[in-house]
Structures are given as C-alpha cells and as structure tokens.
C-alpha cells in the first residue's frame, strides 16, 4: 500500500512537494521490495537437507535427490580458537570424496543420525573378522592400523578426539607413542571412537 501511495504521489502530484514526497516514500520501498525478492530467490536456490533415520533428501530449488547414509561419509571437526566462538562442522561427502553438504552450528543431532545408522554395520563386520576402514585408520579384531602401522589393542592406552584431530596413545618398545590423525581425514569419527573404546583394554 505504501509503495502504491508513493508511486501515485510521484506520478500524479501537481505540486513539486507531492513529487518529492512520493519519491521519498516510494523509491526506498521499491528497493527494499526488490532486495527481498532477490534474497528469497537466492535462498530458494540454496541446498536444504531433510534428514531421516536412514538417509537424507537434498533439495536444491525444485530438484530433489535422495541419499542413504550408507552412501555418504561424514567428517566432523571444530574451528575457532582462543577468543573465538567454536564453530562445529559436519561435512557429508560422497564415497569418492566429493563434498555434498555441510551442516554448521549445532551439528550433534545430524552426526548422531549418521552414527546410529553406521555403528551396527561396522560392529557386525568387525565381529565377523573383517577390517573396517576409517580413512587413515583401520580397525581389525586384533587392533588398529594407523597410517600402515599395526597397533594391537592391548598396547593402546587412550584414544581421544580434539577440535581438529584424533590422538591415539599406545605403547611401543621405545615407550609411549602418540599418533595424530586430522579429523578432516577421518570419516565416521563417532563410530571409530565408539568401536575403538569398546575394544581397548580396561
């Protein structure tokens, strides 16, 4: 209504004052309206993820694509440091490593969905004696293989996740040794930690 009033004053005002009033009222409103429409169209083009128990539907504009969790790899890490608010990231990549979608902010709920789907499958493989790969770490019934080095379960003292890395502390003939793996190289981090801690010595 205000936009129409401003346009009417601008086009049909007999006095210069009416024209000025119309321009003052109408032009900013026209710019705001156009900006809002552009923002809305831009927002509609942004991909949106609709998550379910066994997968997600990725909506980009009018296009929909379904992806099962089994066909995706989640990578979870935290950025931000001293005097900065930590920012949690959860990036979903395809099996060949291509980034598909990234969650920001509170990502725990999405990470738990993916982990709940993957954990029983990985546990079953491990119980059957098959290795389970997590990027640079592979779990076997006998222990871990970290960057090609075998680390038996009895030698592992601690495995911990930090903002951008996973630390594995284990004993060797030369004493304690720490292996560090970047989180951005480690898919299914939550499943890895759960399985590893359940197989470590008490």
Image (tube, rainbow, N blue to C red):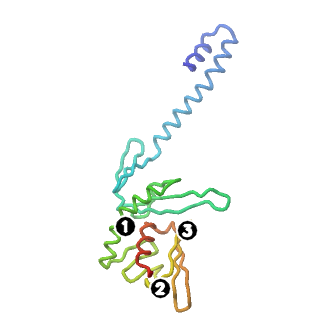
Question: Marks 2 and 1: in contact by CB < 8 Å?
Answer: no
- Of residue 40 and residue 117, the one placed in the foreground of this image is 117
Instruction: Residue at 37%, 53% (x, y): give it.
Output: 56
Return the x and y of residue 111 as percentages of the image width and height.
Answer: 44, 59
Q: Which mark is residue 162?
A: 3
The mark that comes first in sequence, 3 or 2, is 2
Return the x and y of residue 148 as percentages of the image width and height.
Answer: 46, 81
Question: Marks 3 and 1: in contact by CB < 8 Å?
Answer: no
Count of marks overlaid on the render: 3
Return the x and y of residue 85 as percentages of the image width and height.
Answer: 62, 56
Q: Label 3 crowding class (10 Å Cα cut-off): few <14, some 14-19, many 20+?
A: few
Disc 3 to disc 2, C-alpha distance: 21 Å
Q: Residue furthest front?
A: 202
Instruction: Residue at 53%, 80% (x, y): give it.
Output: 169
- Of residue 46 and residue 104, the one placed in the foreground of this image is 104
Report the residue marked by disc 2: 155
The mark that comes first in sequence, 1 or 2, is 1
Q: Label 1 crowding class (10 Å Cα cut-off): few <14, some 14-19, many 20+?
A: some
Q: Quadrant of the C terminus?
A: bottom left
Q: Quadrant of residue 176?
A: bottom right
Say if 164 sits above or below 140 in the image. Answer: above
Instruction: Residue at 33%, 67% (x, y): give it.
Output: 120
Report the residue marked by disc 1: 119
Q: Secondary structure at mark 1?
A: helix
């Amino acid at each position: 209504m205000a936009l129409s009033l401003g346009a009417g004053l601008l086009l049909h005002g007999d006095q210069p004052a009416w024209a000025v009033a119309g321009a003052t009222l109408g032009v900013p409103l026209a710019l705001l309206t156009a900006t809002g429409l552009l923002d809305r169209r831009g927002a509609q083009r942004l991909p949106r993820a609709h998550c379910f128990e066994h997968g997600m539907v990725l909506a980009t504009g009018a296009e929909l694509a379904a992806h099962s969790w089994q066909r995706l790899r989640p990578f979870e890490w935290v950025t931000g440091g001293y005097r900065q608010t930590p920012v949690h990231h959860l990036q979903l990549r395809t099996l060949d490593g291509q980034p598909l979608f990234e969650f920001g902010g509170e990502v725990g709920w999405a990470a738990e969905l993916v982990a709940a789907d993957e954990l029983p499958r990985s546990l079953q493989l491990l119980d059957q004696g098959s290795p389970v790969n997590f990027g640079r770490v592979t779990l076997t019934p006998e222990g871990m293989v970290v960057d090609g080095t075998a680390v038996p379960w009895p030698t592992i003292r601690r495995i911990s996740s930090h903002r951008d890395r996973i630390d594995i502390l284990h004993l060797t003939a030369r004493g304690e040794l720490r292996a560090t793996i970047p989180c951005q190289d480690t898919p299914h981090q939550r499943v890895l930690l759960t399985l590893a801690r359940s197989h470590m010595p008490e």
